[in-house]
Every structure is written in C-alpha cells, then in structure tokens.
Image: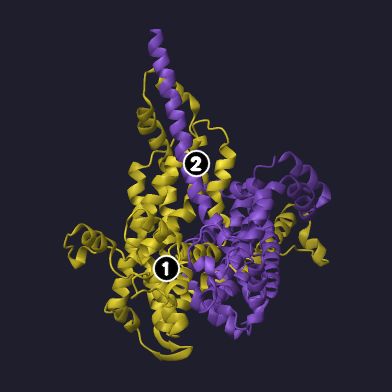
Amino acid sequence: MTISDSRKARVSHMFTRMLIYFVLSVGALIAVAPFGWMILTSLKSYREVATRVVLPATLRFSNYVAAWNAAPFARYFANSLIVSICTVAGVLATSILSAYAFSWLNFRGKDLVFTIFLATMMIPGQILLIPNFLTITRLGWVDTYMAQTIPWIASVFNIFLLRQFFSTIPKDLYDAAVLDGCGHFRYLTQIILPLCKAALITVGLNTFLGSWNALQWPLIVTRSESMRPIQVGLTYFLTESGTDTQEMMAAATVTILPIVIIYFFAQKQFMEGISTTGLKG
Amino acid sequence: MPEIAVPRARKSLRGLFVGQRGRRLKENLLAYLYISPATVILLAFHLLPVLYAFYISLHKWKIVKGSFLGLANYSKALHDPAFWSSLKVTVFYVVGTVPLTLAISLLLAYLLFQKVRGLSSYRTIFFLPYITSTVASSAVWVWIFNPRHGPLNQILEAIGVAPQKWMLEPRGIFQILGEALGLNVPSWAAGPSQALVAIMVFVVWFYVGWDIVIFLAGLGNIPGELYDAAKIDGAGRWALFRHITLPLLSPTIFFLTLMSMIGSFRAFSHIYVMSRAAGGQLGGPLRTTTTTAILMFDHFYSRVRFGYASAIAFVLFIIILLFTVLQQRFGRGRVFYQ
C-alpha cells in the first residue's frame, strides 16, 4: 500500500464519520424540534401565533397561568398521580407474588396456568373495552378510581419479566433458607427482592408510564370533570373550540414535563425494560 | 390416587403439613395463594371478557341487552361500506408506517452502533418522543400541520410550494401529487388521504426511538468476531451489513414487525386526538382516518351500539390472530436464529 493510498483511506474514513454524525444529528433535530416549537409557541402572544412570528418578542409565561386556570389541571394531575401510583403498587404486588410462584414453587397445573397467562397477551385491548365497561358499570364503579386502577393491576408481561429475573438467582441460598424454616415469604422479601431491585424499578417505571399516558380506558370510565386524569382532561381542553394555540401548547408542555424529568433521571431503567422485551422475541 | 391423601391418624390440621407429602401440599396451597390475585384480575378483566364480548356481539345491545340476533351483526359488518373503508384505511396505515419506521430506526441504530461518540445522548434524544404523552405530542403535531398558523406550511411557502390542508384534507396523497404534476390519477389509486399521511408522519416520529432501542439490543448480541473474520476476508461495509448484520438481526426485525403491526391495528389515542383537535370529527375528514379500531370505538362510544361494535372488535381480533399465525409460518423458514 502506498502512502497516497493510506491517505485516501483516511480521508474516506473521515468523510464516512462526518456523514454518520450528520445523519444522526438530523435525526436528533427532527426528534426534538416539535418540542422546541411547542415551548416557543407556549410563550407567544395570540398575535404572534396568528402572524407566524418565529421568535416571541417577550416570553409570556402568563399563558401557563391562563391555561392552568382554564381547566382544573391541578385536579387532573392529582387524579393521574393517585391512579398511576395505585396501579404501580398493584402491579408490583401481584407480579412479584406470581413470578415467585412460577419460578420457585412447584404446583399442580403450573404449565396450564402459565399457558393461560400467556394467551392473555394475544388479546387486543379493543375487544375487552365493551365487556369491561359493562362489568365496571354493573359494579357501580363508573367515575371512580377503582375503575381506572383495578383492571390494570395485573400484567402478564411484568410477571414474565420478573420471573426471568427471579430464576437467575442461584439456588444454593434457597435450600438453606426455605428448608431451615425461613419460609417462602421471608425468602422472597428478604433475599430475592433486594437482589432484583433493578428489575422492580423497570416494572414500576413502565407501569407508571403506561398508566400516566393512558387515554382510551379512562375516557370511557370517567364522567365528571373532577375524576378525569390528566390525559383525558388535556384531550377535552384540546378539542374544545375556542382554546388558543399558545395555551394548548402551555398545557401540553406542563403535561409532558413530569415524565421527561423522571426519564432523565432513570432512562437506563426505561430502556432496560424495552430491550428485554425485544430480546425475548 | 386421590389428590389430597388424608393421613390415617389425623389428630389436628397441623398434621396435614407434616412430612414429605405434607410439605408438597403446603407448597401447592402457597403457590395458589400467590398466583390468586393476578389470576382473579386476569380472568375477570382480560380473559373471560373475550367470551362476554362474543356473547354481546350476538345480540342487539344498545347499553342494555336486546334481542338475540345470531350472527346478524357480523353479516351487517361485512355488508357495511364503512367497515370496508376502515379496513382500507387500516391497511394504508400499516403499510405507510411499519416499514418506514423500521427502515429509519435500523439506519439510525446501525449508525449509532459504529462506535459513535455521544451514543447515549443520541439514544436519549431519539427515545424522547416515545415517553411523552401521546395526547400532548399529538396536539403539538396538529399545530405543526395547522394550515394557517403551522410551521410546516410556513416552510413550504418559503421554498415555493403551495400550502397544504393536511389534517383537513380528505383527498388522496397521490391524487394531490398527480394534480401538482398535471397528471390525472384515477380514484382507485388516490392513496391515503393527506390527513392520514399527517398522522403517519406523527406515528413514525413517535415510534422510531422505541425501535432503535430494540435494534441496539439486537446489534449488541451479534458476536464481534464475525465482523473481524469477514473484514480479514476483505468484506466491505455494505457486505458486512448485508451478510452479517441483516441475517443475524432477522429475529429482531421479525419481532418488531409483528409488534408494530399488532400495535397499528389497535392504534387509538393519536388518531383520536389528531382528528378531533384538527377538524372536530373523530376519524375525519370524511372518515379518511377512520381505522377499524376507531370505527369500533365510534359505534361503541358515540352511537352506543354495543352489539355491532363488539362484532367489529371480534373481526379485528380474528384478523390480528391470522396475521400473527401467518407471520409465524412465514418467519419460520426465513428468520435466521443463531
């Protein structure tokens, strides 16, 4: 290889690297630009929105106050927080117990129950909508927190995720602990759970995200304004005629903010859950 | 052998749990206790409702149960032009979003995998749309597409393209392109409405990050020695991608295709918000964004036809099942597992 050849190779390599960074940066720009535009618009005046001025002359934080007062957003947030936290607690409790039974206990019909659990993952949510709505109506739960949480406090996906983690724990500790009268519950709470903290956080975060962002089900089972979670409240706010753009964008920003903050602190756990999903396929 | 053997000299209930057999019985009971909360919820809200939905679909059911109709709701669906139109919209939606999202995310993931500096920052940014609430981000895109005030038309006008109606435009995208080029596109080839295309753009933007994260996990599983060996044999960049990355990534691609397709069939929130916030009518304009899932919801929620809506939901369910089975069949011969 001559010197000029190697120089050519180096130039071509540099060119490729630049191209890679260019494409990635364009992608990143497209991913964040809508949020930038959302925040910019939320700070404009009505006139600036109408005349399509790109940068607002003064930053009008008053739009946030106006949006906040236009609908009971504080109540919406409180509702979402209550529903999401209860759902996370419920999912963790039911999934931990089931995952333990499936990974550490032997029982009759284990394979059958396992298959039935698996089958529920194939059922699309659409088909459950009407029968579940009728069930909730019959139970008298319409417009309650119960309706928004109870149907979602068991998740087959999370049971399998935890089961996967539980079964990686070496068996040596088990015989010593369980046979010496430590008991299964103590073994679960004092040995397994501390070892699976990361998995539990992943389950908790994904459940929280799903619950916080849910729209269809809460749309159906809430009636009064005071029971609406934030996504339903925001939807009504957006589809009401006469709401100004800058206030809509202010409301959207406020809705997105809590999740983005959690995301920046715990992005590793967010992605862990997702990549585990992918690997199973 | 009886399931629970009664000990011959049973003095108290405690005796039941003594010895090898006793311990096994205790373990069984404990296991049932542990799985019972999840089982109750899953049976009540995720499994038995399927049977209930079928039962509902066999009746005239407007909030309360009416007369038994047999399969009339199903034959009604098959003769309903709105149902067929919704299937067409769904097919447009799937074909327009799934391959494009996969291609873009595979490209970005592959580039990220080339030992790029700042990998985690890029990944964080790409993933950002996915974690935001669909309602809020749909609202942002509705205003991006806003014909009068939105930035997209502003950009188009700046580069000399006529402003478009986007979410308010029921005409097909190929028809619009044809008119711009002076061609006469027949109505069967009009394609998805511009409103549906706007929704598809949102969908691709929203889901690319999710696919990237899964692709990155898949890429990380490909052993590095394979690349080294191929490089020694003089394989170029494209050859490496074509003959190593792509085949070894096929399980991931397969998984993502299946998940995205199932997800597309049940897509709801963003279509609901985008069509309502832009034009007011759910699944509008002129029903050109009414997918089967939206049609089902419309019959259920707006027109309280529970029986008919359940029949539509059931047909959708069967279509999804068929697709899953077909893909498993199709995938078996082609997907390359290590």
Question: Could you tell me the amino acid type at mark 1?
Answer: Arg
Q: Is residue A232 above or below residue A107?
A: below
Q: Residue at horizontal 63%, vertical 81%?
A: A225
Identify the disc placed on residue B148. 1
x, y percent for residue A52 = 48, 63
Q: Residue at horizontal 71%, vertical 57%?
A: B27
B278 or B321, which is in the foreground? Answer: B278
B169 or B258, which is in the foreground? Answer: B169
Question: Could you tell me the amino acid type at mark 2?
Answer: Ser
Q: Is residue B115 visible?
A: yes
x, y percent for residue A93 = 70, 61
x, y percent for residue B254 = 40, 47
Quadrant in the picture for residue A247:
bottom right
Q: Residue furthest top?
A: A2
Quadrant in the picture for the N terminus of chain A: top left
Q: Chain of mark 2?
A: A
Q: Is residue A134 above or below residue A41?
A: below
What is the display colour for chain B?
yellow
Q: Is residue A71 above or below residue A90?
A: below
